[in-house]
Amino acid sequence: MQTQPIVIRVNAEVARIFEADSEQERRKFEALLSIKLSDVTRQKRPLEEVMSEIIRNAQARGLTPEILDSILSDK
């Protein structure tokens, strides 16, 4: 499969964790993200629907609003 780099803005903590991972782990994450983005663009689902699904999945995995606020804060 031919790939092409793109730039996606994330918070500093996510970037730090991604950059600290091994090359193999980064490639796995890139593949997962590529699959998810492909699904979204193929299905032509509204962005709001996709975001709602992501939120539901994150909450099912234990992400609370407090944890999210902590991750997103500049502190």
Image (cartoon, grey):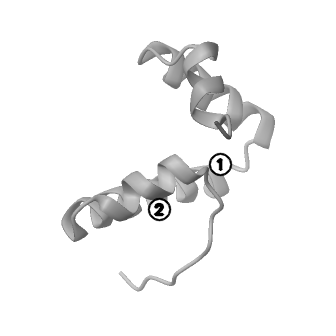
Which structural element holds mark 1? helix
Q: Residue at x 79, y 34 (%)?
A: 48
- Residue shown at 69%/26% (left/top)? 52
Q: Position of residue 68 (x, y in %)?
A: 60, 25
Give me the residue at 47% from left, 62% from top: 34
Left or right: where does residue 24 sit relative to residue 59? left
Q: Is residue 56 left or right of residue 23?
A: right
Image location (x, y in percent) of residue 61:
41, 18
Q: Quadrant of the C terminus?
A: top right
Could you say whether the residue bearing mark 2 is in a helix, strand or loop?
Answer: helix
Give the quadrant of the N terminus. Answer: bottom left
In the picture of the structure, the residue carrying the numbered disc 1 is 43
Q: Amino acid at mark 2?
A: Ser
Q: Is residue 28 above or below residue 61?
A: below
| Cα–Cα gap, marks 2 and 1 | 14 Å
Residue 36 position, x and y percent, is 50, 51
Q: Which residue of the protein is positioned furthest toward the front in this rendering?
A: 75
Mark 1 burial class by Cα count in 10 Å: few <14, some 14-19, many 20+ = few
- Looking at the image, residue 15 lies above or below residue 66: below
Task: Please name the amino acid that badge 1 sits on.
Answer: Gln
- Residue 34 - label: 2
Q: Nearer the viewer, residue 45 or 26?
A: 26
Mark toward the start of the polypeptide (2 vs 1): 2
